[in-house]
Image: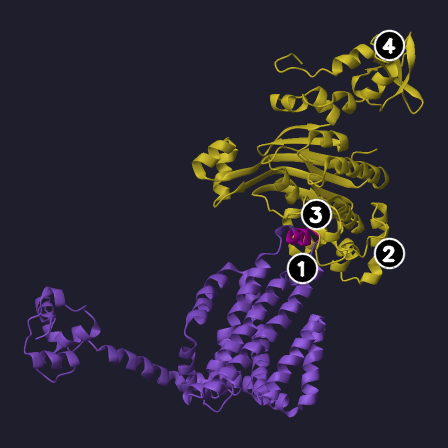
Chain colours: A purple, B yellow
Amino acid sequence: MATYDNFFDTIGLRDWCGDDEGGGLSSMADLMGQAGGNTDTTLWDMPFPSLDALHDSCDAIPQSRDLTQGLEQGFLAIKDSLKVVVDPLTQPLSWALENALWLMQAVPWFIMIPLLMVITYAVGRSLKLVGLVALVFGFLAFIDFYEHTMQTLAIIFVCAFICVLLGVPIGIAMSRSDRVQRTMIPVLDMLQTLPPFVYLIPLIFLFSVTEPKLYGIAIILYAIVPVVRLTDLGIRLVDQDVIEAADAFGMTNRQKLYKVQIPLALPNIMAGVNQTIMMSLAMVVIASLVSAPGLGVLVLRGIRSLELGVGLLSGLGIVLLAIILDRVTKAALARINASQK
Amino acid sequence: MTDDIRISVRNLYKIFGDDPQGALEKVRGGMSKTELQAETGHVLGLNNINVDMPAGKTTVIMGLSGSGKSTLIRHLNRLIDPTAGEVIVNGENILDYNERRLRDLRKHDMSMVFQKFALLPHRTVLENTGLSWEIEGKSRKKYAAEATKWLNRVGLEGQGEQFPAQLSGGMQQRVGIARALTSNSDVMLMDEAFSALDPLIRTDMQDLLIELQAELHKTVIFITHDLDEALKLADHLVILKDGFIVQQGEPQDILLNPNDPYIEAFVSDINRARVLRVRSVMEVTDVPPTDVAGEVDYDDTLESIIAVSEGDTTNNYRVMREGKQVGVLHMRDLVRALVPRHPGEAA
């Protein structure tokens, strides 16, 4: 006899529940109850009227495991049609990741490392930074992590680029319409707080684990948030007096956007890009669970087979990579700030 | 000079709030600003404004903060849309304009100078100055000569490659004025353009504006909260209070015949000798006076006459305009005019 039997009897729903009393045991609690033989529950022990507790008294009410199973069934049911839409849309991502991975590994180290140094100088105009880049890549190559480092870098470049490509226009749309902002903010909050492992589960159902876009999508979803938020914020923070002047001299909305708002929001947008790159680096490690290559694979190996040395060294490699990515983007940001005062 | 009207504002109302049209009925029914705010939460920005702004002259709109002067000037190029009324420019009501025609108006007919300068911080002074040309899609090469000409005219020779942040406030506002002049529009809206500047620099800028005006004859609409500045610059003075016009007219006339205690209180602190001119206090006659102490010009300030007369109040002067006598100035009248009329005294 379960706790809520009386409740269903009194409100007259017994027939609806189905007369199944004394039927098959369905939960551990029932078994325990049978074993103990004590069916009298005191007020103190009264369980919360949860799905399981109500199911004990009334079979028409589903158990909580039916709920999770229902979700799964539902997802599986729409999976195929979802795939028809999402698959071709995301195919370029797979293609870009594959090619970037191939390119970064195909170029020999004695071209790649100087090339990265040149890019660093072009972006940051600082010889100190170039030295740091040479040192870090030299060290990582010296300990035979070169291949993994290049893979990680390739994934970050592609994902961060796509984040900016999608994130900046979304941010602009948010800054122009309060309604878009109101609807986007909860979505961004959710993307930022949902544990990253949770994205992976439905993605695994949707795509095969051999496809690079699986981890590409996971990284982009996780890392796109800061660039969207800071683009929106940056444009909204542009001095209203300057906007008014632009209006008073007859600028069109498009001219205002390209000649005033985006240039003045650029420091904030660049801060967002910096954050986006940092977050994609964080996610690249988790994404190695779903076959993303790179330093994350080594971290995973360290955990799986308890190879302490490998785990620590690859962890250090990621930290070094994070430091140079951060310094280089910050140097670019500082140059923009200096030109704007 | 002919007094052509360049911009004409007719029965303009602006009410801020959720239901401006509903509130408008109440205001037309005679409700005051305070009553409206207490009863409906709406703010009465402008209340039945009628102003004619003469072409080629300086119209100064003066009022304290909250009087609606900045709101009024933003109606002239529709940065703010009114609740009711008309703004007539070139014989057309600009409230009927669509977005494209409105942009054309702002590009070709009106330019604006702002209190906080509102220059683009990421562009050089030259690029800021050529803004209106750039909006038209013209390249830097095309506008460089014109922009440099106006930068030189406002006293910024050789500063074209600086960024605005490298200039002082006064210089930044010179860029603001050069930007407005480079657009070659003949209406210049100046929203408290000199209020953010130091007193000495402000005087310089006022002199610069008067100089430019003497040369270019733009239609200037100038907003200020400073009566000295208003009297110095104005050909036509409009005094606003709580969103309605208390008095408008020739500044000398307002000073001598204030029609409202509010304005009397306002003008009582003014150095009248410096503002009032001979033409406002002279006796109009072409009969030569008998005992002349000398000749003075029609447009001289009373201050300069006091200096000439060395304080002798019994003197009479012939008032000359372009070589002809237009009146006689009695020092006694002059001294009397220096004392403001007191509230309650018969006009």
What residue is disc 1 on? Answer: A260
Per the model, the C-alpha gap separating discs 1 and 2 is 24 Å
Q: Nearer the viewer, residue A175 or A148?
A: A148
What residue is disc 2 on? Answer: B145
* Amino acid type, label 2: Ala
Per the model, the C-alpha gap separating discs 1 and 4 is 63 Å
Per the model, the C-alpha gap separating discs 2 and 3 is 22 Å
* Amino acid type, label 3: Phe
* Amino acid type, label 4: Asn
Q: Are marks 2 and 4 in contact (CB under 8 Å)?
A: no
Q: Which of marks 4 and 3 is in front?
A: 3
Q: Are marks 2 and 3 in contact (CB under 8 Å)?
A: no
Chain letter of disc 3?
B
Residue A172 vs A148, above or below: the answer is above
Per the model, the C-alpha gap separating discs 2 and 4 is 55 Å
Chain letter of disc 4?
B
On screen, residue B58 versus residue A74, left or right, reads right
Q: Is circle 4 on the same chain as circle 3?
A: yes
What residue is disc 3 on? Answer: B117
- Residue A10 in percent (x, y) is at 8, 66
What numbered label is drawn on residue B315?
4
On screen, residue A35 versus residue B148, left or right, reads left
Q: Chief secondary structure of the magenta span?
A: helix
Secondary element at image label 1: helix
Residue A124 vs B140, above or below: the answer is below
Residue drawn at x 73%, y 35% as measured from the top left: B199
Q: How crowded is mark 2: few (under 14 residues within 10 Å), some or many (20 or more)?
A: few
